[in-house]
Amino acid sequence: MRSIDAFGYETTFDSPEHAEQTLTSWNATARAFLSHAANTPVHLSDTLKLTPDFALAQLAKGYFMLLLGRRELIPAAQEAYDAVTPLVPALTPREKAYHDGLGLYLAGRMGPAADVLDAALRAHPHDALLAKLVHAIRFILGDPRGMRSSLEAIIGAYGPDHPSAGYINGCYAFALEETGEYLAAERRGRDALVIAHDDAWGLHAVAHVYDMTGRSAEGVAWISRQPKAWEHCNNFGYHVWWHLALFHLDRGEYDRVLELYDAEIRKEQSDDYRDISNAASLLSRLELEGVDVGERWEEMAALSENRAEDGCVVFADLHYLLALEGGGRPEAASRLLGEMRNRAQRQLGCMDSVAGEAGLPAAQGLHAFASGDYAEAYGWLARARPHMQVVGGSHAQRDVFDRITIEAALRSGLLREARAQIEDRVHRRGAMDRYAETRLARIDELGRQRASGAQKLAAAG
């Protein structure tokens, strides 16, 4: 049978006795996913309990499993794909595209999967769930221009009456920010929150604008005064807390950063790679500022040790490595580096290519930095830096690797290289922040000390 979903498209499932309940639960699943709600899996589970052969629900489950970037969840995604395969002849073209895309994703071909979904989205522009999946996959692939072009092809379909207009505008705001259109991104993100008060992604898009443009006081105010925009969230809420901590870090308020780390960012000690990324990158930033983080690395290292050979997302691997090095787990760090080398040589899927192009050089640089070999660290990190976009995540998230690269140059006495890296960072971000100001001042001071030392040697000679 066919029923019309909240986006106005036909969906296929065979459950006439539960048709209305199934559709209501499915529409709730889609909305919850768009808003990053904690009850997303509850709605999806309810849908599948009512109608196990609901194709779109099974396929959504497959995508949700893969987006978590955990090796042990791949079989569950495969089962969801296989459950739908016998139903394909009866599906609509839109549903078949969901199925085709999931098959490509399972094969490690994330880029082609996003392309297939994008083509379906252009044919079905009102399907906000499809738009969000494309956005999520391209985000993992480090493809902000792809995120933006995908949305620009369909944004005109999201007038004020569309039930997902706020969420799609929030996605577009983030794509604009990641492609450097800060003014437009801020405006679009603010509008998204007016339309959908629970659009956590739109809230976070504006936070990114403030981060990139060095407006930490505005960032603190923006996040703090809108708790209802993200209090409903799944672990994405911890990421919003992370953004708030970054603003306090930029203001030199380190005690507040540690307070947020303990009370909010690590409120639940999960091993979700996004949560570990939040924590590991924040601890790294604090240590680069000379802050003693105590024994906080130990928890991160213990969790990351179990993930050393996941090999699902290079962005995750680099943060696992930060945690393993910070927590003194050399054997696990070595295993992770070995796994990354194997993938870089194998070249069977998108993440293998990312490992070879940027992941492995960056990982070797992080390992050298933790070992105190700063010249070697700088060599590897500087080699990886032009390609780091492909590891995925946002500019704000990848900034930790920029900071470590600059610190490696400073500690190995490469003042000219450090200054060039800082100036390039400022240019790419669009503003001078406290981090850049303090490092440039440090370079000037080291330069004066070097010149003074040279003068003394000359006078003595």
Image: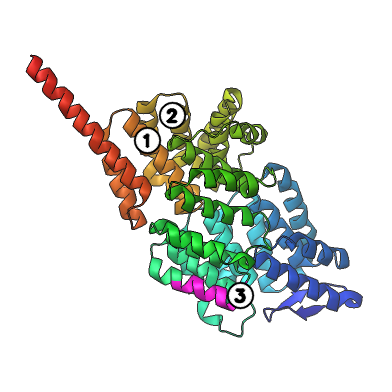
- Measuring 57% from the left and 23% from the top, which residue is drawn there? 330
Q: Mark 3 highlights which residue? A: 196
From what the image shows, is residue 355 above or below residue 213? above
Magenta residue span: 187-197
> Total label count?
3
The spot of residue 244 in percent (x, y) is 53, 55
Disc 1 and disc 2 in contact, CB within 8 angstroms? yes
- Quarter of the image containing the N terminus? bottom right
For residue 195: magenta? yes
User: Which mark sits nearer the N-terminus, 3 or 2?
Assistant: 3
Element on which disc 2 rests: helix
Residue that label 2 marks: 369
Position of residue 77 measured from the top left corner of the image (x, y, whole percent): 73, 52
Residue 287 included in the magenta stretch of the image: no
- C-alpha distance separating marks 1 and 2: 9 Å
CB under 8 Å between discs 1 and 3 = no
Could you tell me which quadrant the C terminus lies in?
A: top left
Q: Nearer the viewer, residue 251 or 268?
A: 251
Identity of the residue drawn at 36% across and 52% down? 433
Sequence-first tag of 1 and 2: 2
Q: Is residue 53 visible?
A: no
Going by the picture, which residue comes out furthest to the right? Answer: 17
Label 1 belongs to which residue?
407
Is 224 left, or right, of 233 in this rendering? left
Instruction: Look at the numbered discs 3 and 2 and tell me whether their residues touch, using CB distance below 8 Å.
Output: no
Q: Relative to 324, say whether 90 is above or below.
A: below
Going by the numbered disc 2, the residue's amino acid type is Phe
Mark found first going from the N terminus, 1 or 3: 3
Residue shown at 21%/33% (left/top)? Answer: 447
Q: Is residue 233 visible?
A: yes
Q: Residues within 10 Å of mark 2 (few under 14, many from 20)?
A: many
- Is residue 260 or residue 374 the one in the foreground? 260
